[in-house]
Image: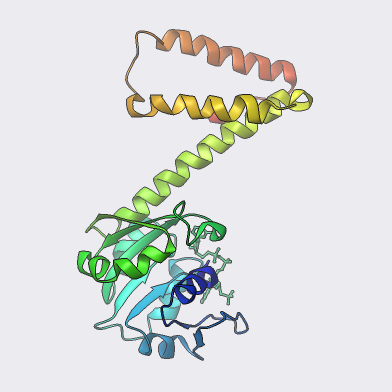
Amino acid sequence: MGETLAETFVSNGHPTTVWNRTPGKVVEGATHAPTAAEAVAASEVVVVCVLDYKAAREVLDPIDLTGKAVVNLTNGTPAHAREFVRGDYLDGGIMAVPQMIGTPEAIVLYSGSRTVFDNYQDTLNVLGQSRFVGEDPGLAALYDLALLSAMYGQFAGAKHALDMVGANRGDFVETLLIPWLTSTMVAIPVLGQSDPQSPDDMQAVAIGNIIEANEDLGLGQPGHLR
Ligand SMILES: NC(=O)c1ccc[n+]([C@@H]2O[C@H](COP(=O)([O-])OP(=O)(O)OC[C@H]3O[C@@H](n4cnc5c(N)ncnc54)[C@H](OP(=O)(O)O)[C@@H]3O)[C@@H](O)[C@H]2O)c1
Protein backbone atom coordinates (compact mmCIF):
# COMPACT_ATOMS: atom_id res chain seq x y z
CA MET A 1 0.00 0.00 0.00
CA GLY A 2 2.82 2.42 0.88
CA GLU A 3 4.36 1.91 -2.54
CA THR A 4 1.04 2.71 -4.25
CA LEU A 5 0.53 5.82 -2.09
CA ALA A 6 4.02 7.07 -3.02
CA GLU A 7 3.49 6.32 -6.72
CA THR A 8 0.21 8.25 -6.62
CA PHE A 9 1.81 11.31 -5.00
CA VAL A 10 4.61 11.22 -7.60
CA SER A 11 2.26 10.78 -10.57
CA ASN A 12 0.27 13.80 -9.36
CA GLY A 13 3.37 15.99 -9.32
CA HIS A 14 4.17 15.99 -5.58
CA PRO A 15 7.91 15.73 -4.85
CA THR A 16 8.12 12.57 -2.72
CA THR A 17 10.86 11.03 -0.61
CA VAL A 18 10.34 7.37 0.32
CA TRP A 19 11.81 4.98 2.84
CA ASN A 20 11.01 1.29 3.38
CA ARG A 21 12.57 -1.04 5.95
CA THR A 22 13.66 -3.54 3.30
CA PRO A 23 15.53 -1.70 0.56
CA GLY A 24 14.87 -2.42 -3.10
CA LYS A 25 11.25 -1.35 -3.40
CA VAL A 26 11.58 1.29 -6.10
CA VAL A 27 9.09 4.08 -6.65
CA GLU A 28 9.83 5.63 -10.04
CA GLY A 29 10.27 9.40 -9.77
CA ALA A 30 10.65 9.44 -5.95
CA THR A 31 13.80 10.18 -3.97
CA HIS A 32 14.87 7.11 -1.99
CA ALA A 33 16.18 8.02 1.49
CA PRO A 34 18.64 5.59 3.15
CA THR A 35 16.98 6.02 6.57
CA ALA A 36 13.53 6.92 7.88
CA ALA A 37 15.07 9.91 9.69
CA GLU A 38 16.41 11.26 6.39
CA ALA A 39 13.04 10.77 4.70
CA VAL A 40 11.37 12.69 7.55
CA ALA A 41 13.98 15.47 7.42
CA ALA A 42 13.36 15.91 3.68
CA SER A 43 9.59 16.21 4.07
CA GLU A 44 7.04 18.75 5.22
CA VAL A 45 4.36 16.06 5.49
CA VAL A 46 5.24 12.57 6.71
CA VAL A 47 2.87 9.87 5.45
CA VAL A 48 3.25 6.59 7.32
CA CYS A 49 1.81 3.29 6.07
CA VAL A 50 3.29 0.14 7.59
CA LEU A 51 1.85 -3.15 8.80
CA ASP A 52 0.69 -2.04 12.27
CA TYR A 53 1.24 0.56 15.00
CA LYS A 54 4.01 -1.51 16.58
CA ALA A 55 5.96 -1.16 13.33
CA ALA A 56 5.05 2.54 13.07
CA ARG A 57 6.41 3.11 16.61
CA GLU A 58 9.61 1.21 15.83
CA VAL A 59 10.17 3.45 12.81
CA LEU A 60 9.16 6.82 14.27
CA ASP A 61 10.01 6.63 17.99
CA PRO A 62 13.70 7.47 17.46
CA ILE A 63 12.83 10.47 15.22
CA ASP A 64 12.04 14.01 16.35
CA LEU A 65 8.74 14.95 14.69
CA THR A 66 8.36 18.39 16.25
CA GLY A 67 6.77 20.73 13.72
CA LYS A 68 6.09 17.96 11.21
CA ALA A 69 2.66 17.16 9.85
CA VAL A 70 2.31 13.40 10.45
CA VAL A 71 -0.38 11.50 8.51
CA ASN A 72 -0.54 7.91 9.71
CA LEU A 73 -2.47 5.64 7.34
CA THR A 74 -1.57 2.43 9.18
CA ASN A 75 -4.54 0.28 10.22
CA GLY A 76 -5.13 0.08 13.98
CA THR A 77 -7.66 0.51 16.76
CA PRO A 78 -8.94 3.86 18.09
CA ALA A 79 -6.75 3.33 21.19
CA HIS A 80 -3.67 2.71 19.01
CA ALA A 81 -4.32 6.00 17.19
CA ARG A 82 -4.89 8.02 20.39
CA GLU A 83 -1.73 6.61 22.01
CA PHE A 84 0.33 7.21 18.88
CA VAL A 85 -0.19 10.98 18.46
CA ARG A 86 3.09 12.78 17.63
CA GLY A 87 3.97 15.90 15.67
CA ASP A 88 0.94 17.70 14.21
CA TYR A 89 -1.07 14.54 13.93
CA LEU A 90 -3.69 13.29 11.50
CA ASP A 91 -4.71 9.65 11.69
CA GLY A 92 -6.25 7.92 8.70
CA GLY A 93 -8.03 4.80 7.53
CA ILE A 94 -7.80 3.68 3.92
CA MET A 95 -11.08 2.21 2.70
CA ALA A 96 -9.65 0.79 -0.52
CA VAL A 97 -7.30 -1.80 -1.93
CA PRO A 98 -4.16 -0.52 -3.70
CA GLN A 99 -5.74 -0.88 -7.17
CA MET A 100 -8.40 1.69 -6.13
CA ILE A 101 -5.96 4.35 -4.86
CA GLY A 102 -6.12 7.48 -7.01
CA THR A 103 -9.69 6.77 -8.13
CA PRO A 104 -12.93 8.31 -6.78
CA GLU A 105 -13.90 4.85 -5.42
CA ALA A 106 -11.15 5.06 -2.79
CA ILE A 107 -12.30 6.69 0.45
CA VAL A 108 -9.70 7.73 3.01
CA LEU A 109 -11.00 8.65 6.47
CA TYR A 110 -9.08 11.20 8.53
CA SER A 111 -9.30 12.36 12.14
CA GLY A 112 -7.13 14.42 14.45
CA SER A 113 -5.64 17.78 13.52
CA ARG A 114 -8.11 19.81 11.47
CA THR A 115 -5.26 22.19 10.62
CA VAL A 116 -3.15 19.42 9.06
CA PHE A 117 -6.18 18.19 7.13
CA ASP A 118 -7.05 21.67 5.85
CA ASN A 119 -3.44 22.52 4.97
CA TYR A 120 -2.79 19.31 3.03
CA GLN A 121 -6.23 18.30 1.80
CA ASP A 122 -5.35 19.06 -1.84
CA THR A 123 -2.33 16.75 -1.60
CA LEU A 124 -4.29 14.01 0.21
CA ASN A 125 -7.14 14.26 -2.32
CA VAL A 126 -4.96 12.62 -4.99
CA LEU A 127 -5.35 9.32 -3.09
CA GLY A 128 -9.17 9.30 -3.41
CA GLN A 129 -12.07 10.91 -1.56
CA SER A 130 -10.80 12.47 1.68
CA ARG A 131 -13.29 12.49 4.58
CA PHE A 132 -12.43 14.32 7.80
CA VAL A 133 -14.54 12.65 10.52
CA GLY A 134 -13.53 14.58 13.65
CA GLU A 135 -10.76 15.93 15.87
CA ASP A 136 -10.59 12.83 18.09
CA PRO A 137 -7.61 10.99 16.50
CA GLY A 138 -9.31 7.64 17.21
CA LEU A 139 -12.43 8.33 15.11
CA ALA A 140 -10.98 7.43 11.70
CA ALA A 141 -9.87 4.04 13.10
CA LEU A 142 -13.28 3.54 14.73
CA TYR A 143 -15.16 4.13 11.46
CA ASP A 144 -12.57 2.14 9.50
CA LEU A 145 -12.94 -0.93 11.74
CA ALA A 146 -16.75 -0.57 11.86
CA LEU A 147 -16.89 -0.51 8.04
CA LEU A 148 -14.54 -3.49 7.82
CA SER A 149 -16.69 -5.36 10.35
CA ALA A 150 -19.79 -4.73 8.22
CA MET A 151 -17.89 -5.93 5.15
CA TYR A 152 -16.56 -9.10 6.79
CA GLY A 153 -20.03 -9.90 8.19
CA GLN A 154 -21.58 -9.49 4.76
CA PHE A 155 -18.84 -11.57 3.15
CA ALA A 156 -19.38 -14.34 5.74
CA GLY A 157 -23.08 -14.43 4.88
CA ALA A 158 -22.40 -14.36 1.14
CA LYS A 159 -19.79 -17.13 1.43
CA HIS A 160 -22.29 -19.19 3.38
CA ALA A 161 -24.95 -18.57 0.72
CA LEU A 162 -22.50 -19.92 -1.89
CA ASP A 163 -21.86 -23.00 0.24
CA MET A 164 -25.63 -23.57 0.43
CA VAL A 165 -26.28 -23.34 -3.31
CA GLY A 166 -23.13 -25.37 -4.05
CA ALA A 167 -23.39 -27.07 -7.44
CA ASN A 168 -26.66 -25.19 -8.15
CA ARG A 169 -24.75 -21.91 -8.38
CA GLY A 170 -25.21 -21.11 -12.10
CA ASP A 171 -25.68 -17.33 -12.36
CA PHE A 172 -26.94 -17.11 -8.74
CA VAL A 173 -24.27 -14.53 -7.82
CA GLU A 174 -24.89 -12.14 -10.70
CA THR A 175 -28.68 -12.36 -11.02
CA LEU A 176 -29.76 -12.98 -7.42
CA LEU A 177 -27.13 -12.58 -4.68
CA ILE A 178 -25.73 -9.17 -5.68
CA PRO A 179 -29.14 -7.59 -6.55
CA TRP A 180 -30.61 -9.06 -3.33
CA LEU A 181 -27.85 -7.70 -1.09
CA THR A 182 -28.08 -4.33 -2.85
CA SER A 183 -31.86 -4.09 -2.38
CA THR A 184 -31.66 -5.06 1.31
CA MET A 185 -29.40 -2.04 2.05
CA VAL A 186 -32.53 0.12 2.57
CA ALA A 187 -33.07 -1.70 5.88
CA ILE A 188 -29.73 -0.56 7.35
CA PRO A 189 -30.89 2.82 8.76
CA VAL A 190 -33.67 1.10 10.75
CA LEU A 191 -31.75 -1.97 11.92
CA GLY A 192 -32.73 -2.87 15.48
CA GLN A 193 -36.19 -1.32 15.19
CA SER A 194 -39.10 -3.74 14.94
CA ASP A 195 -41.10 -3.50 11.74
CA PRO A 196 -44.78 -4.58 11.85
CA GLN A 197 -44.52 -5.45 8.13
CA SER A 198 -41.68 -7.83 8.88
CA PRO A 199 -42.13 -9.01 12.48
CA ASP A 200 -39.31 -10.56 14.50
CA ASP A 201 -41.30 -13.79 15.10
CA MET A 202 -41.65 -14.31 11.35
CA GLN A 203 -37.93 -13.69 10.85
CA ALA A 204 -37.09 -16.18 13.62
CA VAL A 205 -39.00 -18.87 11.69
CA ALA A 206 -36.99 -18.10 8.52
CA ILE A 207 -33.73 -18.30 10.46
CA GLY A 208 -34.85 -21.63 11.93
CA ASN A 209 -35.50 -22.84 8.38
CA ILE A 210 -32.02 -21.76 7.25
CA ILE A 211 -30.49 -23.73 10.15
CA GLU A 212 -32.61 -26.80 9.36
CA ALA A 213 -31.74 -26.62 5.64
CA ASN A 214 -28.07 -26.39 6.56
CA GLU A 215 -28.31 -29.50 8.68
CA ASP A 216 -30.00 -31.27 5.74
CA LEU A 217 -27.14 -30.10 3.49
CA GLY A 218 -24.54 -31.32 6.00
CA LEU A 219 -23.11 -27.79 6.36
CA GLY A 220 -23.43 -27.46 10.14
CA GLN A 221 -24.67 -24.37 11.93
CA PRO A 222 -23.96 -21.10 10.07
CA GLY A 223 -21.67 -19.04 12.32
CA HIS A 224 -23.12 -15.66 11.33
CA LEU A 225 -26.65 -16.68 12.47
CA ARG A 226 -25.69 -17.82 15.99
N1 LIG B 1 -3.25 -3.74 1.05
C1 LIG B 1 -4.51 -3.35 1.26
O1 LIG B 1 -5.45 -3.78 0.56
C2 LIG B 1 -4.82 -2.35 2.36
C3 LIG B 1 -6.07 -1.71 2.35
C4 LIG B 1 -6.36 -0.78 3.33
C5 LIG B 1 -5.44 -0.53 4.33
N2 LIG B 1 -4.25 -1.18 4.34
C6 LIG B 1 -3.32 -0.92 5.44
O2 LIG B 1 -2.09 -0.42 4.98
C7 LIG B 1 -1.05 -0.85 5.87
C8 LIG B 1 0.05 -1.52 5.07
O3 LIG B 1 -0.54 -2.62 4.41
P1 LIG B 1 0.20 -3.33 3.17
O4 LIG B 1 -0.87 -3.92 2.33
O5 LIG B 1 1.21 -2.43 2.57
O6 LIG B 1 0.94 -4.50 3.95
P2 LIG B 1 2.25 -5.30 3.48
O7 LIG B 1 2.25 -5.45 1.99
O8 LIG B 1 2.33 -6.48 4.36
O9 LIG B 1 3.44 -4.29 3.80
C9 LIG B 1 3.76 -4.02 5.13
C10 LIG B 1 4.71 -2.85 5.16
O10 LIG B 1 5.05 -2.60 6.53
C11 LIG B 1 6.47 -2.64 6.64
N3 LIG B 1 6.82 -3.14 7.98
C12 LIG B 1 6.30 -4.22 8.61
N4 LIG B 1 6.86 -4.34 9.83
C13 LIG B 1 7.77 -3.33 9.94
C14 LIG B 1 8.64 -2.93 10.97
N5 LIG B 1 8.72 -3.59 12.13
N6 LIG B 1 9.41 -1.82 10.76
C15 LIG B 1 9.33 -1.14 9.59
N7 LIG B 1 8.51 -1.47 8.58
C16 LIG B 1 7.72 -2.56 8.77
C17 LIG B 1 6.93 -3.58 5.56
O11 LIG B 1 8.29 -3.35 5.27
P3 LIG B 1 9.18 -4.50 4.56
O12 LIG B 1 9.00 -4.29 3.08
O13 LIG B 1 10.54 -4.21 5.06
O14 LIG B 1 8.64 -5.83 5.03
C18 LIG B 1 6.01 -3.13 4.42
O15 LIG B 1 6.48 -1.93 3.82
C19 LIG B 1 -1.68 -1.82 6.88
O16 LIG B 1 -1.94 -1.15 8.10
C20 LIG B 1 -2.97 -2.21 6.19
O17 LIG B 1 -4.01 -2.58 7.09
C21 LIG B 1 -3.90 -2.07 3.38
Task: Please indicate, yes or no, whether residue 143 appears anywhere in the rendered image.
Answer: yes
Q: Quadrant of residue 208?
A: top right
Using the image, determine if residue 36 lies above or below residue 199.
Answer: below
Q: Residue at x 44, y 79 (%)?
A: 59
Residue 66, x across and y down, in percent? 25, 83
Colour convention of the picture: rainbow
Give the image location of residue 185, x and y in percent. Answer: 44, 29
Pick the front one: 46 or 59: 46
In the picture shown, does residue 132 fall above or below 37? above
On the image, the x and y values in percent for residue 10 come to 47, 77
Left or right for 65, reference 160 = left
* Residue 147 in the image, given as x and y percentages of width and height: 42, 44
Identity of the residue drawn at 41% across and 78% down: 14
Q: Can the viewer see residue 222?
A: no
Q: Nearer the viewer, residue 14 or 90?
A: 14
Task: Give the quadrant of residue 168.
Answer: top right
Closest to the observer: 129 or 63? Answer: 129
User: Residue sitting at 47 percent across and 62 percent down?
Assistant: 102
Specify whether 203 is left or right of 194.
right
Residue at the far right in the pictured view: 167
